Image (cartoon, rainbow, N blue to C red):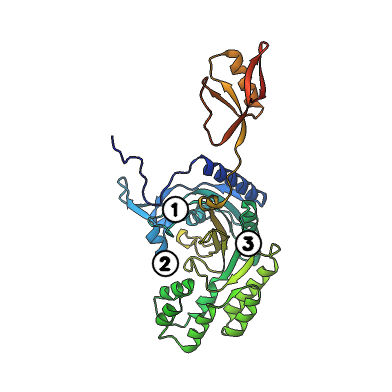
Amino acid sequence: MNTNAWVLPDQISDVLPRQARSLEALRRGLLDLFKRFGYELVIPPLVEYTDALLDDEDEDLELRTVKWADHATGRTLAIRADMTPQVARIDAHLLNRQGVVRLCYFGSVFHARAVGLLTSREPLMIGAEVYGQQGLEADAEIQTLLIEALNFCQLPGVRVDVSHAQIVRALLADVSVKNTAPVYAALQAKDTAALRECTADFSEAVRTALFALLDLYGGVEVLERARAVLPSDERIGKALDDLSTLAGLDAAGVVQFDLADLTGYSYHTGVTFAAYCDGMPNAIARGGRYDRIGERFGRARPATGFSLDLREITEILPTVPAKSAIGAPWRLDADLRDAINALRAQGEVVIQLPTGVVHEEDEFVCDRELVHDTGKWVVRPKA
């Protein structure tokens, strides 16, 4: 016998009953929420060819994706590390609708390397996406739906940091350096030393604007400060106008702005979102506009959306209370079987146990029992 057969790889774990109970409650509730907004559920496959899952410009996604050669075709297969490209493929080719399409999804993704030291390499993602609407109305709907989803999860101290991918793109438009990834990484980490080093050859105006982004974090007043310190540019002005409009729609009072939050910069083309809550060091949800994602499928449609990692969320939520159940004898008795079937048809949980065996399940509490009394089976409170 292999004594190590039960050991799992690093940052891979089972979902045990208590966490699974919370996770399933969230999954069902969130999919119902998305349905009320008109989102249709799709379930993409876990494995696809790499040219469907990967973008040559997204080095981070490339590094997180596990790939191998398909023995049947010789082509390279991959386990998805992100579900959005798959949903974009479904919109572009399988549905091929001309108007607005709202889609939602749920499933595991797998990362060759974890995003953080304490995060799982197998997140359980749920998300919603809108295709076919270029206007800010779609961004506003996604922001509203994200906040509704976070409220449903009852997370403590929720905030949503909003940014815009076009601001930094506008600042770097005239920079001759081809590899700007270090600039984005320094801004994302708010690392002034790294930013100073990688912008040494930039013009003073561009350097000043990039360093200004590091301090442009906070409430709606950030947007007015940004207008004062950033260069006068049509794209920057339009981005700040969009963010101002979204700020006015924040009835929950949870939206803030972080103009240096650039995670997914090669992926996003407009407004971006990152949600945080008390007790979690990493973002619990991310999203934004990604109008170019359908290009590889020959049909680049306007698109925006978000995703949440339910596995991480359930780590900090209270356990869903155990469900009331009825304990019953475990015997081959026709009358007993009829009584149990009738109770289950009414929605009751009935658990049969041998005589003298203690009920050990986490998910159910047998607070009642099915007993034979005066010739019939009846339910009574457990002594």
Residue 143 disc label: 3
Residue 120 disc label: 1
Looking at the figure, which quarter contains the N terminus?
top left
Residue 127 lies in what quarter of the image? bottom right
Tell me which amino acid carries mark 3: Gln
Is residue 77 shown left or right of residue 300?
left
Residue sitting at x 67%, y 69% = 247
- Of circles 3 and 1, the one toward us is 1
Badge 2 density bin: few <14, some 14–19, many ≥20, Cα 10 Å? few
Tell me which amino acid carries mark 2: Glu
The picture places residue 27, in percent across and down from the top left corner, at 57, 46
Tell me which amino acid carries mark 1: Ser
The picture places residue 321, in percent across and down from the top left corner, at 61, 41
Badge 1 density bin: few <14, some 14–19, many ≥20, Cα 10 Å? many
**Frontmost residue, 64 versus 104:** 64
The picture places residue 320, in percent across and down from the top left corner, at 60, 43
Relative vertical location of residue 358 with respect to residue 268 in this rendering, above or below:
above
SS at circle 2: loop
Q: Earlier in the sequence, mark 1 or mark 2?
A: 2
The picture places residue 25, in percent across and down from the top left corner, at 59, 44
Q: Name the residue under label 2.
A: 57
Looking at the figure, which quarter contains the C terminus?
top right
Residue sitting at x 60%, y 54% = 102
